[in-house]
Image (spheres, grey):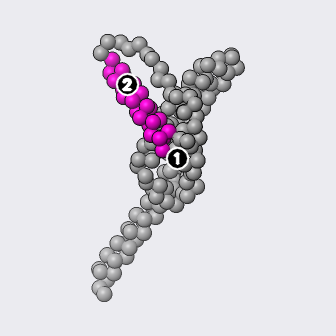
Amino acid sequence: MSMLARTILIAVVAGVIGLVGGFVVGVRDGVSQFFLLDSTAKASLLTFELQALREGNVKTIIEAKEIELDGEVVRATELLRAGRPWIFWPNYEYERDHERYLKRVASYRQEYPPVVPTVEYAPNSTIREEMEAFADDVKESTRQIISEYGE
C-alpha cells in the first residue's frame, strides 16, 4: 500500500471514529442538557404557585395545575405517536413505565375532565386560533388517553 493510500485510510478511519464518538457524546450530553433547558422557567413558576398557596389561593393553583396537566397530556400523546425511544440509546435511565403513568392520568381525567379556560380576545386576534387549536388538542389527547388507558 502506498504512503498516500495509507494516509488517506488513516484519515478516513480517524474521521469515522471522531464522528461516531462525537455523535455518542452529543446524544448523551445533549439529552441531559435538553431536560435542563426549562429549569429556570419552572423554578419561577413554582415561586408563583408557592406564593399563591401561602396566600390561600388554592383555586388559582388548581387551575394552573390543570392547565399544566393538559399540556403534558398533549405532549404525552405526541410521545406515544412518535414512538422513538431508541433515540435515547445510551441513556436508558430515561426509560419510563408510561403505561402505569397514563393509567393514573386517565383515572384522574375520568374523575376531573379538562376545563379549557375561556378568555376574551381582541378582534382579529391570532392567539384565539392557537388557543382554540390547543383546546382541540387537549380534548382529543384526553379522549385518547382515557380510551387507551382508562378503566
At label 2, the amino acid type is Glu
- The CA distance from mark 2 to mark 1 is 32 Å
At label 1, the amino acid type is Gln
- The residue drawn where x is 55% and y is 54% is 95
- Residue 90 bears which disc, if any? none
**Is residue 13 depicted above or below 107 in this figure?**
below
Residue 138, visible in the rendered structure: yes
Q: Residues within 10 Å of mark 1 (few under 14, many from 20)?
A: few
Boundaries of the magenta span: 125-148
> Which mark is in front, 2 or 1?
2
Q: Give percent across and percent down for residue 105.
A: 56, 38
- The residue drawn where x is 54% and y is 38% is 106
Count of numbered circles in the view: 2
The residue identified by callout 1 is 33
Is residue 133 highlighted in magenta? yes
Q: Earlier in the sequence, mark 2 or mark 1?
A: 1
Name which quarter of the figure residue 143 lies in.
top left
- Return the residue nearer the eye: 79 or 50: 79
The residue identified by callout 2 is 132
Q: Residues within 10 Å of mark 2 (few under 14, many from 20)?
A: few
Residue furthest front in the image: 151
Is residue 126 highlighted in magenta? yes
Residue 36, visible in the rendered structure: no
* Screen quadrant of the N terminus: bottom left
Query: Horizontal placement of 27 versus 59: left or right?
Result: left
Q: Give percent across and percent down for residue 83.
A: 43, 52
Secondary structure category for the residue under label 1:
helix
Secondary structure category for the residue under label 2:
helix
